[in-house]
Each structure stands twice: as structure tokens, then as C-alpha cells.
Amino acid sequence: MTPAARHRAFVALGANLADPVAQVRAAASALAGLPQTEVVRVSSLYRTAPVGICGQPDFINAVAGLETALAARELLAALFAVEARFGRRRDFHQAPRTLDLDLLLFDEQTIDGESLVVPHPRMHLRAFVIIPLLEIAPGCRIPGRGRASAWAPAVAMQRIERLV
């Protein structure tokens, strides 16, 4: 990759089915295999309560920082392909899953399209995103929302446990 073609992206990883710790670790490795993409840093793993639908297993979450020459929509398509390889199904909104990969941030861009919204619209409200993001990028800014660290108090009451 040439330096001019590089983009900085952050991706949330999550799973709560089929050995979620192994799923998230394997997914982080799979991100390293994306074309024209380098994994710069991956956060620790975190155990969190499911959001929305109760009665499902806890999630294992992490955030990865990437440098990529892919455009945002190309990166999103690559993330969907990784999810599919891991057996991701979209039976219903907030269903349990073998893997969930969300494109959180792409450079300082704001994208509001039919199939892609960046920054992720609820990332600032989720401890499972903010806490691991701050671990790997403490000075990170969320376009339109300011410093990610400013949102830590808003998610402080959400259950999150650092594993590794």
C-alpha cells in the first residue's frame, strides 16, 4: 500500500454463539487477510450483556484498528464476506450471532448511505464499542460527536468485563 492510499478504519467484532472467544480471535486474524489491509491493533476481549433481546448468551467483543487501501464500501463488503465465512445469519434484528463485524469509523468521514452509515450511529452509546476503542485509540474522535473519551461516562453503567 502506498501511504497516499491508506485509510484508517475501526471495526467492532462481536460474537455470542459457537465459542465466541475463539470466534472473535479468529475473526481478528481473518481481518489481517483482507486485501490491501493491515491490522494495526486489536483491543483486549470484553464480555458484555446482550443489547435489546434478553435471554441470549453474553457477547465477546473487541475493536480492531485497520489501515486499508479499500474504499469504505469495499471494506464493508469484505467484512460481510468474513461474517458469511463464519456462518453469520441475519434471522432477525439483534439475534444471537456467530460473528458481527461493524465498520465504526473510516478516517474522519461521515457517510450516510442506504447500505453504510459511518460513524456507526449507536457506537457512542455502547460500552462494548467505546471501552475497547479507547484502549487502542485513546485520542480517537467520532465525527459529529467529538472525542470518544467524552462518551465513556455515558456508558459507565453498562456491564463490561475485560477478559484478555
Image: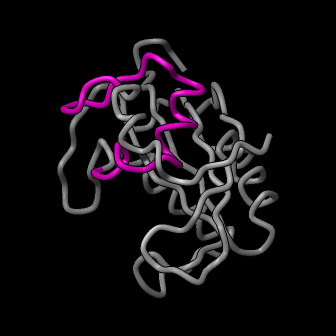
Spot occupied by residue 17 in the image (x, y as percentages of width and height):
71, 74
Which residue is located at x 48 percent, y 36 percent?
Answer: 10
Which residue is located at x 55 percent, y 62 percent?
Answer: 100
143 or 86: which is nearer to us?
143
Which residue is located at x 45 percent, y 22 percent?
Answer: 6
Indicate the colouring scheme: one colour
28 or 147: which is nearer to us?
147
150 or 8: which is nearer to us?
150
**Left or right of 75, for residue 41:** right
In this picture, is 98 found above or below 154?
A: below
Q: Is residue 135 magenta?
A: yes
Spot occupied by residue 110 in the image (x, y as percentages of width and height):
21, 37
**Left or right of 30, for residue 3:** left
Q: Which residue ends up furthest to the bottom in the rendered image?
A: 91
The quadrant holding residue 164 is top right
Q: Which residue ends up furthest to the front in the rendered image?
A: 157
The quadrant holding residue 34 is top right
Range of the magenta residues? 121-147
The quadrant holding residue 85 is bottom right
105 or 45: which is nearer to us?
45
Which residue is located at x 64 percent, y 63 percent?
Answer: 59
